[in-house]
Image (cartoon, grey):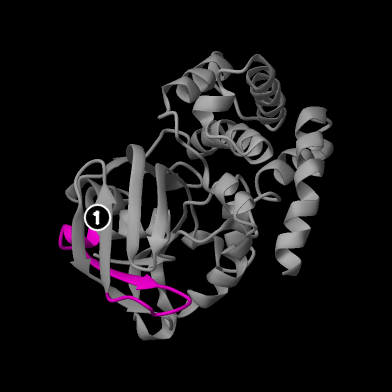
Amino acid sequence: MRIAVIGAGGVGGYFGGRLAASGIDVVFIVRKKNFTELRVDSILGDFRIDAHVTDDPSEAGKVDAVLMCVKAWQLADAAEAIKPMLNDDTCVVPLQNGIDAPDVLASVIDRRHVLGGLAGIVSFVVEPGHIKHAASEPFVMFGELDNARTQRVENLRAAFERAGVKAEVPIDIHRAMWTKFLFIAPLSAIGAITRLPIGAWRSEPETRDLAETMLREIDALARARGIDLDANAIAMTMGRYDGLAPESTSSFQRDVMEGKPSELDAQLGAVVRLGRESGVATPVTKVLYDCLAPLERKARSS
């Protein structure tokens, strides 16, 4: 099986590295070809590999699967770039922190290539070719948009399992993506606003209440859009927050704190926009979005 990993940041570098270390044929597609060895420092064990890296997707050849590990706002351009690598049955898996990624991909490439997907990991780039996995057991979930159990999905799941990565094909990929979205959006928003790791803000009544209120807004939005989340989804998500390592932050938060463009529109912006479309009030999310929007505009202008 040949797999292309688009982006070699905290997500792409870790999961692509684990796949390559298990002997799977992996090519990393990056904007700048500035490393040939990939080093991953992980709480589950450090490793290094000689990495196949290119900044030209047309050089990579055809692949069986593409893992889209760029930021949400880079997804459309990345989808255009991967076209030379697609064969008739190539599957393209978005691993962004957002809810719109499959639709973004399907607006650029044929929808038959597109899967739903998500990942869980706390990791970041130390420098090009050097990834730090700092917390949480990494996992991936993916599946066909119609939830069919196809051979290409099973082949990809087997590849991750061979690499020692927890991989699941859920019964309903859309429900799984909304469950992840419910988790990540408040974590990102409150971390970015407070500029504190989760261990600091989850113990304060004001920010804890803010998180629960935002969770209720997203839960109501999901249900209005036909996604039946677990009846205890809000309590379970708060429990997940309490279980995270105290120093944990989201990539969204780190981007905001570093003055970089972030996934504001793909996370909080999506809640506000979809809420408006569905007639669901999202006032807390809207306030947090409005507070962060000037920082986002400043980051993009520079």
Q: Quadrant of residue 20?
A: bottom left
Q: Quadrant of residue 88?
A: bottom left
Q: Is residue 200 left or right of residue 295?
A: left
* Whole-percent x, y for residue 204 in the image: 61, 18
Q: Is residue 213 left or right of residue 233?
A: right
Q: Quadrant of the N terminus?
A: bottom left
**Can you say whether 56 is above or below 131 in the image?**
below
Q: Residue at x 76, y 68 (%)?
A: 301
**Can you say whether 211 is above or below 12 in the image?**
above
Q: How many numbered circles are shown?
A: 1
Element marked by disc 1: helix
Q: Amino acid at mark 1?
A: Arg
Residue ID for mark 1: 18
Q: Nearer the viewer, residue 288 or 111?
A: 288
* Whole-percent x, y for residue 244 in the image: 42, 28
Q: Residue at x 43, y 81 (%)?
A: 55
**Residue 30 located within the stretch drawn in magenta:** yes
**Can you say whether 94 is above or below 56 in the image?**
above
Q: Residues within 10 Å of mark 1 (few under 14, many from 20)?
A: many
Q: Nearer the viewer, residue 82 or 111?
A: 82
Q: Is residue 13 left or right of residue 117?
A: left
Q: Residue at x 83, y 38 (%)?
A: 276
Find the residue positioned furthest to the left.
23
**Magenta-drawn segment:** 18-36
**Residue 23 located within the stretch drawn in magenta:** yes
Q: Quadrant of the C terminus?
A: bottom right
Q: Is residue 234 left or right of residue 19?
A: right
* Whole-percent x, y for residue 64 in the image: 33, 66
**Can you say whether 40 is above or below 80 in the image?**
above
* Whole-percent x, y for residue 116 in the image: 49, 48
User: Can residue 9 be seen?
Assistant: yes
Q: Residue at x 59, y 31 (%)?
A: 182
